[in-house]
Amino acid sequence: MKVPAGKVIVLVVSIAVMLTTGCGPQEPPNVKKTRVIAAENIELRRQLDRRNKEIELLKEQYQKETKAQKKLLQECLQEKEEWQNKSRQNIRNQVKGVLDTVLEENTKLREENKQLKSQIAEIQKQPQ
Protein backbone atom coordinates (compact mmCIF):
# COMPACT_ATOMS: atom_id res chain seq x y z
CA MET A 1 0.00 0.00 0.00
CA LYS A 2 2.94 2.23 0.19
CA VAL A 3 3.01 2.76 -3.57
CA PRO A 4 -0.53 4.06 -3.82
CA ALA A 5 0.01 6.33 -0.83
CA GLY A 6 3.13 7.78 -2.53
CA LYS A 7 1.18 8.38 -5.64
CA VAL A 8 -1.55 10.10 -3.66
CA ILE A 9 0.98 12.36 -1.96
CA VAL A 10 2.57 13.30 -5.27
CA LEU A 11 -0.85 13.99 -6.71
CA VAL A 12 -1.90 16.14 -3.74
CA VAL A 13 1.35 18.12 -3.89
CA SER A 14 0.93 18.63 -7.67
CA ILE A 15 -2.62 19.88 -7.23
CA ALA A 16 -1.52 22.22 -4.44
CA VAL A 17 1.24 23.66 -6.59
CA MET A 18 -1.15 24.13 -9.49
CA LEU A 19 -3.72 25.86 -7.28
CA THR A 20 -1.19 28.23 -5.79
CA THR A 21 0.31 29.23 -9.13
CA GLY A 22 -3.03 29.05 -11.01
CA CYS A 23 -4.32 32.06 -12.91
CA GLY A 24 -2.42 34.82 -11.24
CA PRO A 25 -1.46 38.05 -12.99
CA GLN A 26 0.96 37.62 -15.83
CA GLU A 27 4.43 38.94 -15.46
CA PRO A 28 5.29 42.02 -17.47
CA PRO A 29 7.55 41.29 -20.42
CA ASN A 30 11.15 41.52 -19.58
CA VAL A 31 13.46 44.21 -20.93
CA LYS A 32 14.98 42.01 -23.64
CA LYS A 33 11.56 41.16 -25.03
CA THR A 34 10.57 44.84 -24.96
CA ARG A 35 13.69 45.83 -26.90
CA VAL A 36 13.02 43.18 -29.54
CA ILE A 37 9.42 44.36 -29.94
CA ALA A 38 10.54 48.00 -30.16
CA ALA A 39 13.14 47.12 -32.81
CA GLU A 40 10.53 45.22 -34.80
CA ASN A 41 8.14 48.18 -34.54
CA ILE A 42 10.82 50.57 -35.76
CA GLU A 43 11.63 48.30 -38.69
CA LEU A 44 7.96 47.91 -39.55
CA ARG A 45 7.53 51.71 -39.50
CA ARG A 46 10.52 52.09 -41.82
CA GLN A 47 9.06 49.52 -44.18
CA LEU A 48 5.70 51.29 -44.04
CA ASP A 49 7.36 54.62 -44.86
CA ARG A 50 9.22 53.05 -47.78
CA ARG A 51 5.97 51.53 -49.09
CA ASN A 52 4.19 54.86 -48.74
CA LYS A 53 6.97 56.58 -50.71
CA GLU A 54 6.78 53.87 -53.38
CA ILE A 55 3.01 54.33 -53.57
CA GLU A 56 3.42 58.10 -54.01
CA LEU A 57 6.01 57.59 -56.75
CA LEU A 58 3.78 55.10 -58.52
CA LYS A 59 0.83 57.50 -58.29
CA GLU A 60 2.92 60.30 -59.81
CA GLN A 61 4.16 57.98 -62.55
CA TYR A 62 0.59 56.84 -63.25
CA GLN A 63 -0.60 60.44 -63.49
CA LYS A 64 2.23 61.34 -65.88
CA GLU A 65 1.53 58.32 -68.06
CA THR A 66 -2.20 59.01 -68.04
CA LYS A 67 -1.58 62.63 -69.02
CA ALA A 68 0.76 61.54 -71.82
CA GLN A 69 -1.78 58.99 -73.08
CA LYS A 70 -4.56 61.58 -73.06
CA LYS A 71 -2.36 64.00 -74.99
CA LEU A 72 -1.50 61.30 -77.51
CA LEU A 73 -5.18 60.39 -77.86
CA GLN A 74 -6.05 64.04 -78.44
CA GLU A 75 -3.36 64.31 -81.12
CA CYS A 76 -4.60 61.14 -82.81
CA LEU A 77 -8.18 62.40 -82.79
CA GLN A 78 -7.06 65.71 -84.27
CA GLU A 79 -5.03 63.92 -86.95
CA LYS A 80 -8.03 61.71 -87.72
CA GLU A 81 -10.20 64.82 -88.12
CA GLU A 82 -7.62 66.36 -90.47
CA TRP A 83 -7.51 63.20 -92.59
CA GLN A 84 -11.29 63.11 -92.77
CA ASN A 85 -11.37 66.74 -93.88
CA LYS A 86 -8.71 66.09 -96.53
CA SER A 87 -10.65 63.07 -97.74
CA ARG A 88 -13.87 65.08 -97.98
CA GLN A 89 -12.06 67.85 -99.84
CA ASN A 90 -10.53 65.37 -102.31
CA ILE A 91 -13.93 63.83 -102.93
CA ARG A 92 -15.45 67.30 -103.46
CA ASN A 93 -12.69 68.21 -105.91
CA GLN A 94 -13.17 65.00 -107.85
CA VAL A 95 -16.95 65.33 -107.89
CA LYS A 96 -16.69 69.00 -108.80
CA GLY A 97 -14.41 68.20 -111.73
CA VAL A 98 -16.75 65.50 -112.98
CA LEU A 99 -19.81 67.63 -112.31
CA ASP A 100 -18.35 70.60 -114.19
CA THR A 101 -17.58 68.37 -117.15
CA VAL A 102 -21.07 66.86 -117.07
CA LEU A 103 -22.70 70.30 -116.84
CA GLU A 104 -20.65 71.60 -119.76
CA GLU A 105 -21.53 68.54 -121.80
CA ASN A 106 -25.16 68.90 -120.83
CA THR A 107 -25.18 72.56 -121.91
CA LYS A 108 -23.60 71.65 -125.26
CA LEU A 109 -26.11 68.87 -125.79
CA ARG A 110 -29.02 71.22 -125.04
CA GLU A 111 -27.73 73.75 -127.55
CA GLU A 112 -27.26 71.01 -130.12
CA ASN A 113 -30.74 69.72 -129.30
CA LYS A 114 -32.19 73.20 -129.90
CA GLN A 115 -30.37 73.46 -133.20
CA LEU A 116 -31.59 70.05 -134.29
CA LYS A 117 -35.16 70.90 -133.29
CA SER A 118 -34.99 74.10 -135.31
CA GLN A 119 -33.57 72.19 -138.28
CA ILE A 120 -36.34 69.58 -137.95
CA ALA A 121 -38.91 72.37 -137.81
CA GLU A 122 -37.44 73.95 -140.98
CA ILE A 123 -37.38 70.62 -142.78
CA GLN A 124 -41.00 69.98 -141.82
CA LYS A 125 -42.00 73.43 -143.13
CA GLN A 126 -40.43 72.81 -146.53
CA PRO A 127 -42.67 71.31 -149.16
CA GLN A 128 -41.81 67.84 -150.12
Image (tube, rainbow, N blue to C red):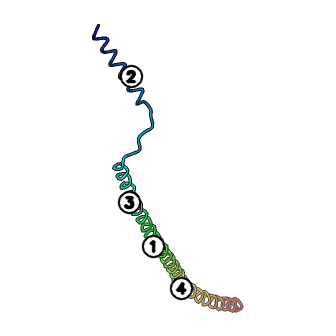
Q: In the rendered structure, which disc, 1 or 4, sits on the residue that comes first in sequence? A: 1
Residue type highlighted by circle 3? Gln
Q: Which residue in the protein does label 1 denote?
A: 64
Q: Position of residue 38 (x, y in %)?
A: 38, 54
Q: Secondary structure at mark 4?
A: helix
**Residue pictured at 56% horizontal, 85% vertical:** 96
Which image quarter holds the C terminus?
A: bottom right
**Vertical position of residue 116 compared to residue 20: above or below:** below
Q: CA distance from mark 4 to mark 3?
A: 68 Å
| Numbered badge on residue 73 | none
Residue type highlighted by circle 2? Ile
Q: In the rendered structure, which disc, 4 or 3, sits on the residue that comes first in sequence? A: 3
Q: Which residue in the protein does label 4 denote?
A: 93
Foreground label between 1 and 4:
1
Q: In the rendered structure, which disc, 2 or 1, sits on the residue that comes first in sequence? A: 2
- Image-based side of 93 in relation to 122, left or right: left
Q: Position of residue 75 (x, y in %)?
A: 48, 78
**Residue pictured at 72% horizontal, 91% vertical:** 125
Q: Secondary structure at mark 3?
A: helix
Q: In the rendered structure, which disc, 2 or 3, sits on the residue that comes first in sequence? A: 2
Q: Residues within 10 Å of mark 2 (few under 14, many from 20)?
A: few
Q: Which residue in the protein does label 3 denote?
A: 47
